[in-house]
């Protein structure tokens, strides 16, 4: 839209600044924001006072909706009396999340705050609310959970076996708070580090973090097709046993090597 408005291509930052100066003069506004899709946005006041805000993401799936997200977040923040610099920061943060998804998606307040807390993350790491809204209908949902602290080759082999089920693989990990409460000390790797490691595994489609002692509530909400546990649980009574029965999920046991 900016290129159409100014009549020339925006090939680099100098072109963007030239376009911003031209547009600001034409529309007579105090500040101008230009969305640059995967490259973030420009906050422009005058040729000596401007800031390029880079999108805080490494994974770009689809730039559709980035501009709309910038406009929406700017409007929301400014309506709440935020300063333009604050509004622009949150706008580029939201746009960075938008381009990590295919098509146009919306985000909750909690999802935005989680991204603010975690910084750069993987598109595979989602909140429980977002997972519930976007579960696939056409393929089985496969669910497993655990601490996944001190991740080993055995963990990797266990998770790679999920692909044999040909479904959408969801891995839920206990939060730092949950592990500390159960074990009496914090995990070796914090929840963000564990989530990032798991998200890098090809067989894992989504990673969520939960605070409960077990995954019963998650299983009831997700209603997976298959729940996978380690082989050593086969002769034990699982804390999620009732939730698995209620959800109608099939229970599978995989070796952990």
Image (cartoon, grey):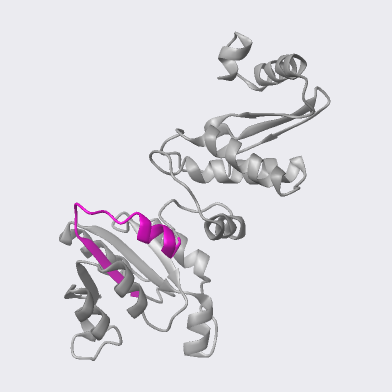
- Residue extending farthest to the right is 48
| Vertical position of residue 34 compared to residue 200: above or below | above
Residue 39 covered by magenta stretch = no
Q: Which residues are magenta?
A: 127-145
The residue lying toward the viewer, choosing from 37 and 220, is 220
Q: x, y percentage for residue 218?
A: 35, 73
Q: x, y percentage for residue 65?
A: 48, 35
Does residue 193 appear anywhere in the picture?
yes
Q: Examine the image and state in which quarter residue 94 appears.
A: top right
Q: x, y percentage for residue 162?
A: 22, 63
The residue lying toward the viewer, choosing from 188 and 241, is 241
Does residue 10 appear anywhere in the picture?
no
Q: Is residue 120 left or right of residue 146?
A: right
Q: Quadrant of the C terminus?
A: bottom left
Which residue shows up at 59% across the image and 37% down it? 70
The residue lying toward the viewer, choosing from 60 and 75, is 75
Please state the total of marks drawn on the protein image.
Answer: 0
Q: Quadrant of the N terminus?
A: top right
Which residue shows up at 23% across the image and 72% down it? 227
| Vertical position of residue 28 compared to residue 39: above or below | above
Q: x, y percentage for residue 52?
A: 69, 33
Which residue shows up at 59% across the image and 19% down it? 2
- Residue extending farthest to the front is 79
| Vertical position of residue 161 compared to residue 184: above or below | above
């Amino acid at each position: 839209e900016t290129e159409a408005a100014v009549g020339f291509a925006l090939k680099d930052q100098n072109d963007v600044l030239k376009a911003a100066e031209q547009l600001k003069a034409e529309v007579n506004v105090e500040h101008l924001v230009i969305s640059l899709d995967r490259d973030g946005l420009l906050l422009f006041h005058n040729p000596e006072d401007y800031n390029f805000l880079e999108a805080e993401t490494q994974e770009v799936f689809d730039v559709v909706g980035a501009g709309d997200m910038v406009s929406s977040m700017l409007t929301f923040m400014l309506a709440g009396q935020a300063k333009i610099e604050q509004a622009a920061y949150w706008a580029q943060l939201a746009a960075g999340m938008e381009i990590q998804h295919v098509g146009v998606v919306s985000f909750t307040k909690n999802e935005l705050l989680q991204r603010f807390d975690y910084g750069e993350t993987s598109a595979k790491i989602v909140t429980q609310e977002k997972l519930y809204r976007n579960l696939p209908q056409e393929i089985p949902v496969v669910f497993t959970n655990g601490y996944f602290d001190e991740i080993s080759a055995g963990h990797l082999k266990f998770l790679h076996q999920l692909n044999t089920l040909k479904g959408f693989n969801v891995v839920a990990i206990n939060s730092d708070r949950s592990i500390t409460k159960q074990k009496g000390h914090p995990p070796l790797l914090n929840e963000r580090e564990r989530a990032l490691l798991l998200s890098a595994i090809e067989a894992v489609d989504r990673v969520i973090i939960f605070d409960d002692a077990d995954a019963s509530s998650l299983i009831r909400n997700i209603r997976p097709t298959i729940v996978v546990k380690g082989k050593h649980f086969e002769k034990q009574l699982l804390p999620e046993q009732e939730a698995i029965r209620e959800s109608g999920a099939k229970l599978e046991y995989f070796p952990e090597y």
